[in-house]
Image: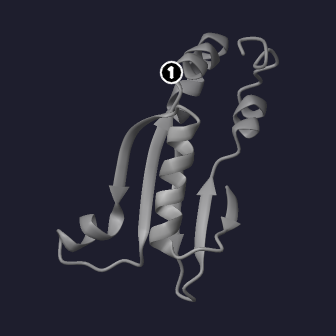
Amino acid sequence: MIRVISTHPFDITVKQVKYVLNKKSMHLFLQTDHVKDAESVGAELMPAHLFVFGYSTIGTKLMQCDQRVGIELPLKILVWEDDRNDVWIGYKNPLWLAEYYDLKDYSKPF
């Protein structure tokens, strides 16, 4: 997982991630506020927000190279706040997918 510390508060970071996904024309399949989910079962969590997103054209082409990559799609970004109040953005490196699934021709579909 690639982790990047944010220079902004949690709520602003969540808004910025959503803005960037929208600006890049990514389809946002799901947004999950893990805190609200935890509260619904009477539990507490530090702030954590999950984005599930993708770009169907690219995802389809990757799966045409190796259908097993579908287990990794759509992609995800997690924004969370740790116990020191640092805000983090984490995601799997897409180049790792190409390497792991041996997608030698992964750049050709694009």
Q: Which image quarter: residue 87?
A: bottom right
Position of 35 compared to 103: left or right? left
- The answer to whether 15 is drawn above or below residue 93 in the figure is below
Query: How many numbered marks, from 0 up?
Result: 1
| Outermost bottom residue | 84
x and y percent of residue 46 in the render?
A: 41, 78
x and y percent of residue 90 in the render?
A: 61, 58
Position of 30 compared to 102: left or right? left
- The answer to whether 92 is drawn above or below residue 3 in the figure is above
Give the residue at x 59% y 81%: 86
| Outermost right residue | 104
Give the residue at x 71% y 27%: 101
Q: Mark 1 points at which residue?
A: 56
Q: In which quarter of the image is the C terminus?
A: top right
Q: Tell me the amino acid under the disc marked 1.
A: Ser
x and y percent of residue 6 in the render?
A: 64, 70
Seen from the viewer's position, the closer of residues 87 and 8 is: 8
- Numbered disc 1: secondary structure: helix
Q: In which quarter of the image is the N terminus?
A: bottom right
Seen from the viewer's position, the closer of residues 60 and 100 is: 60
Identify the coloring.
one colour
Give the residue at x 52% y 25%: 70
Give the residue at x 60% y 20%: 58
Density class for disc 1 (Cα within 10 Å; few <14, some 14-19, many ≥20) is: few
Position of 96 compared to 22: left or right? right
